[in-house]
Amino acid sequence: MTEKMVNVAVAGATGAVGNQMIRCLEERNFPVRSIKLLASKRSVGRELRFRGDLMPVEELTDESFAGVDVALFSAGGDTSLRFAPLAAQAGCVVVDNSSAWRMDTQVPLVVPEVNPHAIAGYKVKGIIANPNCSTIQMVVALNPIHRAFGIKRIVVSTYQAVSGTGKKAVDELFDQTRAMINFLGYENKIYPHRIAFNCLPHIDRFQENGYTKEEMKMVNETRKILEDDRIGVTATTVRVPVFFGHSEAVNVETREKITAVAVRKLLEESPGVEVVDEPTKNRYPLATDAAGQDLTLVGRIRQDESVQNGINLWIVADNIRKGAATNAVQIAEILVKDYL
Ligand code: 25A
Ligand code: L14
């Protein structure tokens, strides 16, 4: 059988996530027949490499999607709200990395290791949403635990890298760090406070309930992906001076009796997970090890001795790869193989 080939577009191709999407399409040998690299007018004139060839960046317009089969979007929420429906109307399936469509009941929210069956729901609007980076890595690790022991409640604190905000935030951490160690002045342009040598308990906008939007994404998206509204989730999301890789301290309470030994064994056999848990050898998941690869690293697996059925975990993944680009390309792979 000859392989199905598809016409692909990447919207937001010049951004941190868009660029990684292009690399993932190459690395995973996605069946690309043609590719369009789209961004705002600002980026027209730039060229990006795909499989060795330099390709021009084109302006994203209403007409960009004629003849395109699959469009990967990472150009921010406003751009997705405006252009994803137009792309769908043109007959293209959109895999959207922004927060715009995630909680739409007619749009599936997918992590391939967890709920690949939900992809079928793309037919209603022609859009599939890619979850928030912090949610993706958490549900990759917690879904097997939920299926085996029934999760009642999740308490999570995150330690999130600046790359989630995009290239300009990576530059800001670098510039501020260099300024500090040279006793020079610095500016806060991207974040409201200095991020170098600091921790900011503030990711995305504050909501009326006192939580940030990032924290509420973790609450609502987790329930949608695990398909269980009974799960209690509470989150504190923190920006730390790390370039790549989000870390999470996660406490889970379950309905069934749970042990650290059983969880370790279960996660060793779970898709997309690598257990890194040999504390006596100083082996535990680190952002520096998670960066540049696609697995979700899980370690520090311990019984929570303060409740009847509880477990603590430390979960780390590359926020730009599994947290965004890789997950989107994995969704597109299933879409092409099973639906197009
Ligand atoms: O969903 P949300 O909350 O609304 O936000 C999602 C955004 O968060 C980022 C990602 O931004 C995404 O757009 N993100 C990072 N990690 C994520 C994750 N895990 C994540 N989102 C979800 N999950 P990004 O920085 O990676 O990419 C932004 C891209 O979007 C393009 N873009 C913006 N507006 C557009 C548009 N494309 C088409 N039409 C529009 N209207 C953007 O391209 C980029 O590719 P660009 O051409 O605007 O910028 C290209 C270069 O120019 C620099 N630049 C940006 N703004 C300015 C600028 N230069 C000068 N002045 C400016 N005002 C950029 O640094 C870039 O290099
Ligand atoms: O996917 O780290 O909703 O600043 C928006 C903010 C991703 C990360 C999303 C950040 C995000 C992001």
Image: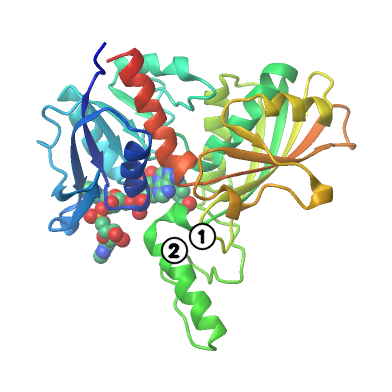
Task: Name the residue furthest top.
Answer: 1
Confirm or deny contact between disc 2 and disc 1 (CB under 8 A): yes
Q: Residue at x 33, y 32 (%)?
A: 29
**Which amino acid does the dot numbered 1 rest on?**
Phe
Q: Which residue is drawn at 64% across and 51% down?
A: 286
Q: How busy is the neighbourhood of tag 1: few (under 14 within 10 Å), some, or many (20 plus)?
A: many
Out of 250 and 19, give the one closest to the viewer.
19
Residue at x 75% of width, y 19% of height: 149
- Mark count: 2
Residue 101 image position (x, y, % from top left): 37, 32
> Outermost residue, bottom direction?
183
Look at mark 2 in the image and give the residue it sits on.
170
| x and y percentages locating residue 52 in the rendered image | 23, 47
Q: Is residue 130 left or right of residue 249?
A: left
The type of colouring in the image is rainbow
Say which element carries label 1: loop
Label 2 packing within 10 angstroms: few (<14), some (14-19), many (20+): many
- The x and y percentages for residue 152 are 73, 25
